[in-house]
């Protein structure tokens, strides 16, 4: 006789999850995304832009959730078209420097309140709790990252109006909000973008203690506040690389543009010193010597990463 547990949790569920995991391809974000530009911590943005840790991996349930959000976007776009509205350019892309990117869900024409004006379209899905707060407080207050994302894209694309369309996953309720372009908000975001892209070292921490919500749930917490986490070894964590115009990265040794993805770097790779939780002691022809807080000494050898010096 089959056990109740086998009936409640058939293997097909694990097979579905395994299929999602197998098809997932964790990858670095090539450019600084508008969806992140509203983050309070510029150090977090810099870590992401510089590929300071390997790309984040997600459990299969979360992968399915992301896919559900994408499917809802497509559904709502079709529904907008059915109403007679014009929707152009799904995943409409904006970039000011080549190192940044904003991907709106489309451009919308025919909104009743201003039918002759193109609106930048952004579609998001929400839990019931998030959706309730959105209805009570509006998008700017309840979802500041979404607001910043839209303002940044509107600024780069020189668009004066935006439409935020939200879907509640719990009850299928919809919410829409029109917003105006805010030049002051955009200027702040553009200045932040330039600081993050052009800084050769990590920006200041938003908390020296590492406590609080923003730090507790940050993917880069162990690197930012830990004492043993080493960064990922790739061209963007190397002291020789620099972002230049039009989305290009240059290497001062090779004098050429770097590839989009170069996980291991070359045989001359040396970490940006401020990425390491150590004190620089000396530099030589073969690498750089560091001392950790516990007194241990490490060599960052050309192209070989970090090597502990044995006693």
Image: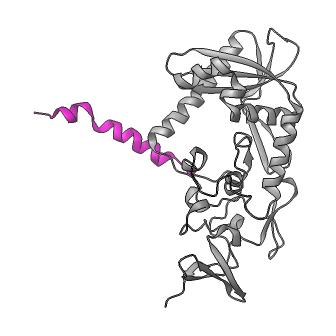
In the rendered structure, does residue 232 fall within the stretch colored magenta? Answer: no
Q: Which sits in the foreground, 306 or 5?
A: 306
Q: Quadrant of residue 37?
A: top right
Q: How many marks?
A: 0
* Residue 100 percent across, percent down from the top left: 78, 47
Q: Position of residue 254 (x, y in %)?
A: 80, 74
Residue located at (63% from left, 65% from top): 263
Task: Check if residue 16 falls in the magenta segment.
Answer: yes
Looking at the rendering, which quadrant does residue 166 occupy? top right
Q: Is residue 25 above or below residue 258?
A: above
Q: Is residue 215 visible?
A: yes
State the residue in front, 257 or 188: 188
Q: Mainly helix, strand or loop, the magenta region?
A: helix
Q: Quadrant of the N terminus?
A: top left
Residue at (74% x, 58% y) in the render:
203
Quarter assignment of residue 122: top right
Q: Is residue 37 left or right of residue 78?
A: right
Left or right: where does residue 177 sit relative to residue 296?
A: right
Horizontal and vertical percent for residue 185? 84, 35
Residue 95 can be seen, yes or no: no
Vertical order, 22 against 182 (above or below): below
Where residue 281 sits: x, y (%)?
A: 68, 84
In percent of the image, x 80 and y 65: which residue is there? 242
Residue 203 against residue 136 in the figure, above or below: below
Residue stretch rendered in magenta on the structure? 1-26
């Amino acid at each position: 006789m089959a056990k109740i547990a086998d009936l409640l949790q058939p293997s097909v569920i694990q097979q579905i999850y395994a299929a999602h995991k197998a098809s997932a391809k964790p990858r670095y974000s090539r450019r600084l995304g508008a969806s992140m530009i509203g983050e309070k911590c510029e150090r977090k943005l810099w870590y992401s832009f510089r590929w300071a840790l390997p790309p984040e991996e997600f459990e299969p349930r979360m992968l399915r959730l992301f896919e559900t959000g994408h499917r809802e976007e497509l559904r709502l776009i079709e529904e907008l078209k059915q109403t007679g509205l014009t929707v152009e350019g799904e995943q409409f892309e904006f970039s000011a420097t080549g190192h940044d990117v904003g991907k709106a869900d489309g451009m919308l024409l025919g909104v009743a309140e201003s039918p002759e004006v193109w609106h930048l379209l952004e579609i998001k899905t929400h839990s019931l709790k998030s959706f309730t707060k959105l209805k009570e407080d509006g998008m700017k207050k309840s979802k500041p990252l979404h607001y910043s994302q839209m303002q940044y894209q509107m600024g780069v694309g020189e668009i004066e109006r935006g439409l935020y369309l939200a879907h509640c996953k719990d009850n299928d309720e919809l919410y829409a909000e029109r917003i105006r372009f805010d030049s002051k908000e955009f200027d702040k975001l553009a200045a932040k973008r330039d600081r993050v892209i052009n800084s050769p070292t990590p920006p200041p921490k938003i908390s020296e203690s590492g406590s609080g919500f923003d730090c507790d749930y940050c993917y880069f917490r162990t690197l930012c506040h830990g004492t043993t986490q080493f960064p990922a070894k790739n061209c963007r964590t190397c002291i020789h690389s620099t972002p230049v115009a039009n989305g290009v990265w240059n290497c001062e040794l090779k004098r050429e543009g770097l590839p989009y993805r170069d996980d291991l770097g070359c045989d001359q790779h040396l970490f940006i010193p401020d990425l390491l939780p150590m004190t620089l002691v000396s530099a030589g022809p073969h690498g750089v010597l560091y001392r950790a807080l516990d007194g241990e000494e490490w060599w960052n050898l050309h192209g070989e990463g970090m090597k502990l010096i044995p006693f």
